[in-house]
Amino acid sequence: FEKGIQWLQQIEQVGQHLQAIRQSQVELQAKQDAFKPDQIRLDRALEVVSLDGDYATLKGLQQQQEKEQQALLDDQQKLPDQEKLVAQHQATVDQTQQQLQAAKSALQTQSPVLKQVRALDIQIQNQQAALSKSQQQQSLVQQQIQQKNQTIEQQQIMIDQQQNTLADIGRYLEGHQQDEWLVTGLAGVEAQLQQLVSYESQAHQLKMALDDLAEKSKSDKSPQAQTLQVQAELDKVISQQKAFQLEDDALQSKKEALLQGKLLREYHAERDSAFREMTLVRKIESLEEERLHLVDGQPCPLCGAEEHPYAADVPVSNALEDKIQKLDALIGQVDALEAERVELQQKKEKLTEQAYGLQQQLVQLEFDLKQLASETTRIEQQQHELQEYIDTLKVKLQEQLKDHLQDDISNPQAVLQALKAKAAQWQVQQKALHEAEKQLAQLQANQKEAAASQGPLEAQLHELAESVQQLEKSISQQQEQRFELFGEQNPDNIESQLQADIEKAEKSLQALQGVLQQSQQVLSGLLQQIDYYEQQIAARAPELQELQQAFEKALDAFELDEPGYLQARLAPPERVALQEQARKLQQQQIALDSKAHDRTAELVQLKEQQLTDRSMDLIQADLADTQNKQQILVENISELNLQIKQHEEALIQVAARKDAIDSQKIECDRWTKLHELIGSADGKKFRNFAQGLTFELMVAQANKQLAKMSDRYVLTRSIAAPLELNVIDQYQAGDIRSTKNLSGGESFIVSLTLALGLSKMSSRKVRVDSLFLDEGFGTLDEDTLDTALDVLSSLHQEGKVIGIISHISALKERIRTQVQVMPGFAGKSVLNGPGCSAAV
């Protein structure tokens, strides 16, 4: 079926392809018809394309001939103007040469006069310099004389001022003669005044301290008020403790009434046993249908047993459910009561801590009251003694300073500042007196020296005046001679001007000669170009005529004139585009013809195969029927495969259950053996077993500590009673004794080693870092006591805190850190030691 369908489909597809090719051929023919006008133009252009080279050569030569003819005409028009310009430049050059010769003659005529004038200018300049120097010296001497006079006058004024200053200082020292003592005696007075300030400051601080104590005793936070408040809180806490104790007793009574003399774990065990029994009964009830087929003597298909006790009579689980509910209710009530007791116990512990804290506060407050009274008495005594010191010191200072102060010594700091100011002022005046006398002597000496130096300066001034007068007369005569010779003109400027005229004429001549040369060169170039163009034009004319005749002859061969040739030829880009379009149309025509031929041959070949004479619809109907039958067979095969897979899985499950049963038998045997070892209803066997392991570890640790103190004894567990302890006496041939037969000292050592061994057994979560030993040391001899203390000392070095309660004097000498309990009044005791200051 499939081959027939495919054959018919191929014939249909090939026919469709052939039809599409024929449609493309029709469309291509339309494009070719539209391109026919362009094809005619392209064919005509290709015919005349051979003339393009000759035409280009002719046109290029004609354009060159026309260009040079125009250039010749332009140069012939420029020639008269250029000849006129050369004549003008030649006349300008001649005139400039005459001006240069006249400038050189003028410089040669003025040279002797300029030399004579320069000589006179140098003489006048030198004499003016000498005159200026003499005038400067004359002015300087006059200034020196004037300065000397001013100095003498100023020194006289300063002498008068210093004499007045000396008189003022003398009057001050005479009027304050008593202040001279302060220069040497102020140090002792200052020490006494500072001591007085210190005493007054201390007295003020003591007064403030008394005021603070008085204020504290009156406030609500005073020790008296706090004592009453703390005592009231303590009474309240004690009352709450009593109420909680009554409530705890009531809860305990309810719990005992519920338990009826049994332990709670016994009810838990009874409930678990009933639950297991009820589970088994329900399992039996669920197999009721299977039990109907059981026959005595024949194995059960599930467990294999041949006896079937529950085949007919099935126990009922209702009674067990009631029992479990009652036990759950009882256990829940007991747990609730126990939770209430735990919560109540926590409250009692908090109240105990609170009561202890309040008692400590009361002790501290009593101590604070005593301290407050003692502090008040001490401060009042210090205040009285300080006041006596202050009064005595004030009287002594008043007597010493009666000549220097009018006021009393109520402000010691102000008195000290005033005395320091008087002493400092006396010293300042003394120093000023010596300085003024020294400055007066120096001023008088300077005045005499200035008066003696005036005579030589006046003589020097007279000599300078005569020299200035002579120089002025000589300069005036030379200036008159120069004016008659050259007037006010500057010879350098005149010579520079003449030289500049020569240079200007030379530069102008040089530039004009260059311009003349350029214009002559341009004229020569024009004449050469005219000659060149005339020769070229004449030589090109025959060649141009020959090319024109040859091109006209070529046009005659195509029966064209020059305008017709220009119309037939196409530009190269347009010609290439039309050629490309014609080539593409031709390629498309060839491709379509080839495809039409191939598809026609393929169609003929397919029809010759003649695979079927039926139609497509009949063949497709037969194919659908066959596919339906195939689908039914596939489904039947899948169902059989599924049944095979389920059977294989069932075999695997049976094998797994058999393995589980074997494994469970092994587990059941292991639990049976464990039950024989430690199993019991009340848990006693397991408890003894676990305690025995812990006890064994503790005995091992205790023996390590015992070996440090004595090599005589070794602790061991009793064989008859594993939780009891025996002692092996190494000194008595390994005799084993019970701990009940040990002496007091031996019992203490055993107890101590057990306690130390227990501290070594502390777990990761619970650390035993503190040990308290109450008495027992009095039963030890000296050597054993020393050994025990050495062991305890090594534990202290490991970070353990060891507390020993004892009255043995040897211990008091060995232990430096001690807390002593001293009897007090009203049945109380007092603790003395580090960190202890309260009565308990």
Image (tube, rainbow, N blue to C red):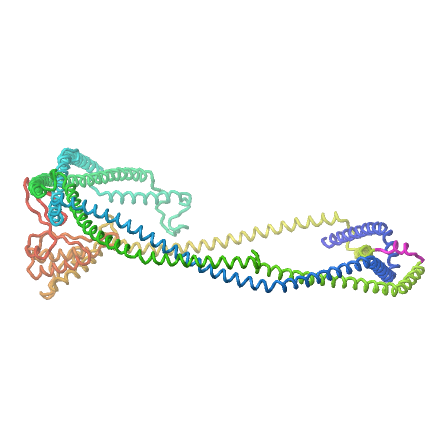
Front in this rendered view, residue 211 or 216: 211
User: For this rendering, which residue is in front, 52 or 693?
Assistant: 52
105 left or right, relative to 231: right
**Residue 696 quadrant:** bottom left
Figure check: 827 above or below 562: above
Q: Position of residue 353 (x, y in %)?
A: 18, 41
408 left or right, relative to 35: left
Report how many numbered discs are placed on residues in the image: 0
Name the spot of residue 580 as percent of width and height, x first: 80, 56
Q: What is the span of residues highlighted in magenta in the rendered image?
A: 559-570
Residue 791 in the image, given as x and y percentages of width and height? 14, 60
Quarter of the image holding residue 829? top left
In this orientation, which residue lies closer to the viewer: 665 or 187?
187
Is 563 covered by the magenta stretch? yes
- On the image, the x and y values in percent for residue 325 come to 30, 38
Q: Is residue 377 visible?
A: no
Residue 136 visible, this orientation: yes
Does residue 387 sit above or below 579 in this rendering? above
**Up-down relation of residue 145 to residue 527 (above or below):** above
Instruction: Quadrant for the C terminus, please.
Output: top left
Does the magenta run of residues contain 158? no
Give the quadrant of residue 721.
Answer: bottom left
Q: 419 or 601, which is in the foreground?
A: 419
